[in-house]
Amino acid sequence: MSIWDKLATAFKGGSMRTARGRQFGGEEAYDSPKRSDAPVDDALPFTAGMIMLGAKMAKADGVVIKDEVRAFKRAFKVSDAEMRDAARVFKRAQQDVTGYETCAEQLVTVFKGDRKVLEYILEGLFHIAKVDEMLHPREEKYLRQVAKHLGFTDAEFALMRARHIVGPERNPYEVLGVKSSVSDEELKSQYHRLIANSQPQECVARGLPKEFVVIATAKLAVIKEAYEVIARKRNFS
């Protein structure tokens, strides 16, 4: 059964109960009794959280900027067959009265504050928002608010935002999280640290759906591009 089949099944009752025993789309998230040896499925709550927060982005905008369902499909390379279930879940999430604040806070609880997984979720929302090659100011405001509820600082949000600016406005130093006055050695050290923390296989190792490898892959490409731009200007490799 694919992740989309699981989500469609989980949402049939009107709310989404994950394999971690948590509920999305309600007033609370809570533990349900489970065997101590029961496998933990991070893929389901991760994907559900991504879809619910992505679906609520249209509501937060106040206007329909684009078809968020189609944006989700394009951003994460979901097949036509799988998209039927994904769209059903997406549309149900759009109709849900639960606010994005509650969804974000539930995700923090579900993943016990795992900042890496929460970062993947926020990065994924950026992918949905910019799929039409622009980041609308209302979308950016929404993403900033979600980031705060996920526990990220303004500085951490700015670093993520820098990676998702499209075109010549992207500042390579901001992408790498350094100032333009940074020394060559400090720049190289930061670059290698970012590369080590942005490997696509880590996404799979954490049990996240294969569709979301696109998040880490895109992040890695932007980091490499930013470093190459600076390296050419400074005449080193």
Image (cartoon, helix red, strand yellow):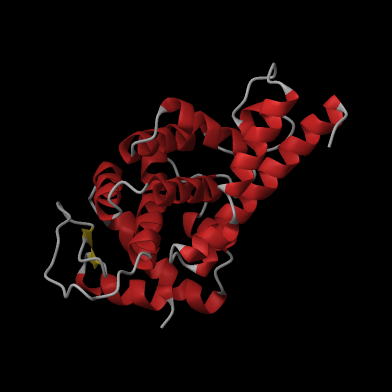
Q: Which residue is drawn at 88% across and 28% down?
A: 235
Q: Could you tell me residue 94's position as x and y percent?
A: 34, 55
Q: Which residue is drawn at 65% across and 44% down?
A: 133
Depth check, front residue: 214 or 197: 197
Q: Could you tell me residue 233's position as x and y percent?
A: 84, 26
Q: In this view, does 23 lie above or below 40?
A: above
Q: Residue furthest left?
A: 33
Q: Could you tell me residue 92's position as x and y percent?
A: 31, 63
- Quadrant where the image shows the C terminus: top right
112 horizontally vs 128: left or right = left
167 horizontally vs 46: left or right = right
The answer to whether residue 70 is seen in the rendering is no
Q: Which residue is drawn at 31% across and 37% down?
A: 149
Q: Which residue lies furthest to the bottom in this view?
A: 1
How many numbered marks have been drawn onto this rendered protein structure?
0
Q: Quadrant of residue 78?
A: bottom right
Depth check, front residue: 27 or 30: 30
Q: In which quarter of the image is residue 93?
A: bottom left
Q: In this view, does 220 lie above or below 227?
A: below
The answer to whether residue 17 is seen in the rendering is yes
Depth check, front residue: 3 or 233: 233
Q: Quadrant of residue 193?
A: top right
Q: Could you tell me residue 139's position as x and y percent?
A: 47, 38
Q: Which residue lies furthest to the right in this view?
A: 235
Q: Which residue lies furthest to the top in this view?
A: 181
Q: Residue at x 35, y 33 (%)?
A: 148
Q: Is residue 81 above or below residue 219?
A: below
- Quadrant where the image shows the N terminus: bottom left
Q: Is residue 79 above or below residue 115?
A: below
